[in-house]
Image (cartoon, helix red, strand yellow):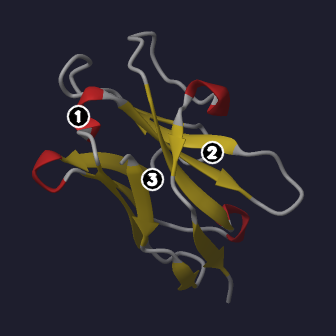
Amino acid sequence: QVQLVESGGGLVQPGGSLRLSCAASGFSLDYYTVGWFRQAPGKEREGVSCIDSGDSGHGNTYHADSVKGRFTISRDNAKNTVYLQLNSLKPEDTAVYYCAVGPYYGLGPNFSPLEYDYWGQGTQVTVSS
């Protein structure tokens, strides 16, 4: 059974850091593109970061302009887990963060939610003083 479980969200002050985890079971994350998305109240779901298949795509990583230089996506194949390190957090980063898995196409960053087949339940990140 394919399952994705996110964890690591919470309440943090502006400028703080969090590390989100996306643990997979039922399949190997290394064969797929893994994306992190976020959705704030009243807004559409937006792509934040994604990492290519390590098996086919050399594990290339991509970040949206809004988080570039602050967020880092990485993969631990031994733990079958993808991480999202969030640094220098801002109030506008507040959202529910989701990880998702989709096919590797080799066409660069994939921030379209429609291209992803499996989703986790989400973890809340709140940035507030």
Task: Identify which residue, 36 or 6, lies in the foreground.
Answer: 6
Q: Where is residue 105 in the image (x, y as percent from the top left)?
A: 42, 12
Nearer-the-camera pick, 116 or 126: 116
Label for residue 116? Answer: none
- Give the labeled residue for mark 3: 71
Q: Which residue extends farthest front?
A: 1
Figure quadrant of the C terminus: bottom right
Residue 94 place in picture, x, y as percent: 68, 68
Q: Which of marks 3 and 2 is nearer the N terminus?
A: 2
Mark 2 residue element: loop
Name the amino acid type tagged 2: Ser
Q: Quadrant of residue 127?
A: bottom right
Task: In the displayed orientation, state which residue is furthest to the bottom.
Answer: 129
Left or right: where does residue 102 sit relative to residue 41? left
Foreground disc of the pair 3, 1: 1
Q: Do the residues labelled 3 and 2 touch (CB within 8 Å)?
A: no
Q: Which mark is residue 66?
A: 2
Mark 1 surroundings: few (<14), some (14-19) or many (≥20) residues within 10 A: many
Query: Marks 3 and 1, how far apart in space?
Result: 20 Å
- Residue 30 image label: 1
Residue 102 coordinates in the image, percent (x, y): 46, 29
Left or right: 96 as drawn, with respect to 71: right
